[in-house]
Image: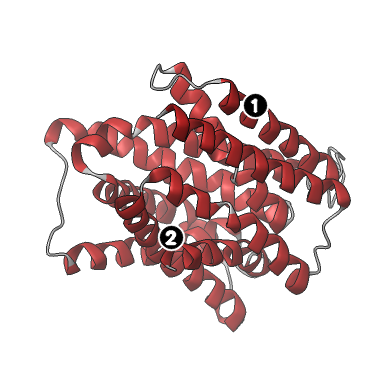
Amino acid sequence: MGLFLMAVIWGINFPLIKASLPELPPLAFNALRFPLAAGTVLLVLKAKNRVPWPQKGDWPRVIGLGVLGNVVYQAFFIFGVDRTYAGNASILLATTPIWTLALSTARGHERPGLQVWMGVLATLCGMCLVVLGGGIKIGVPGSVFSGDLLMIGAAITWSIYTVGSRGLIQKYGSLPVTAWTLWIGSLGLVVLGAPTLLRTPLGEVSLLAWSGMVYAGVLAIGFAYILWYRGVQRIGNSRTAAYSNLTPVVALFVAWIWLGEVPRPLQIAGAAIVLAGLSVARLGRERAG
């Protein structure tokens, strides 16, 4: 039940952010929501009576991952959501496991079999259909192509963060590493977004936009991350990751009903192929394991 709730939270997050960004610019939005997310994770760790810290020699790596996994990734993510459909954003970000697999293979961490590579190929083909379904109109106002590219950049960046944090996670555990990098990233995002935030007429921001910012910080990052790591601890990585495949489905449905983003046939086909490819690749990795 917790992992299903996690997928629903993440699915709603995409159209909710999309609806909030016209009033809260991307950098200002991140500067407000990330301190809330960092505070949520801190409260959870304190509730468990432990706030561990990395060893002195690991700090440079933690700082680098914090900048990469939050500041750089969030730049791709928030501007990507702003410039493309909420449904497209959720589908393209769902390809993250495929990029992670490619990087892990290049680093020698994994040796995927034929079934896994078939899933990878299917996912990439589905991704292309999603992008083509939005229409490629470079430099044309209203085009979602640049946003699609930014979301692919976000997926690749998060994959690099995931592979790069492997050693620290094996040493300290997933939740502490996520907390450290989140706190570091939050500081960077506040500094980066402060000038935009100061220019934003916050008194004119609607309740919907404020609610979207709080939801994106407290629930979509803070609370949902906790549900994710609890799932990993109880049922393992692969079975937990399977639930995240529901996220694009929820996002497409909510964006359709709420934002009027009627998915085109190519986008629907692409989404189905992406989810099928992810499932095939995941099952192949489980068998290999």
Could you tell whether 44 is left or right of 110 in the image? Answer: left
- The coloring applied to the image is secondary structure
Could you tell whether 66 is left or right of 131 in the image? Answer: left
Residue placed most toward the observer, 236 or 215: 236
Quadrant assignment, res 34: bottom left
For image coordinates 46% across by 60% down, the residue present is 31
Q: Along the polypeptide, which appears first: circle 1 or circle 2?
A: 1
Disc number lying in front (1 or 2): 1
Q: How crowded is mark 2: few (under 14 residues within 10 Å), some or many (20 or more)?
A: many
- The reply to whether the C-beta atoms of the residues labelled 1 and 2 are less than 8 Å apart is no
Q: Is mark 2 on a helix, strand or loop?
A: helix
Q: What element carries label 1?
A: helix
Quadrant location of the N terminus?
A: bottom left
Q: Number of numbered discs present? A: 2
- Which amino acid type is marked by label 1? Met
Give the numbered dot on residue 221: 2
Asked if residue 215 shows in the view, the reply is: yes
Instruction: Residue 136 in the image: state x and y as whole percent.
Output: 85, 39
Name the residue beneath numbered marker 1: 118
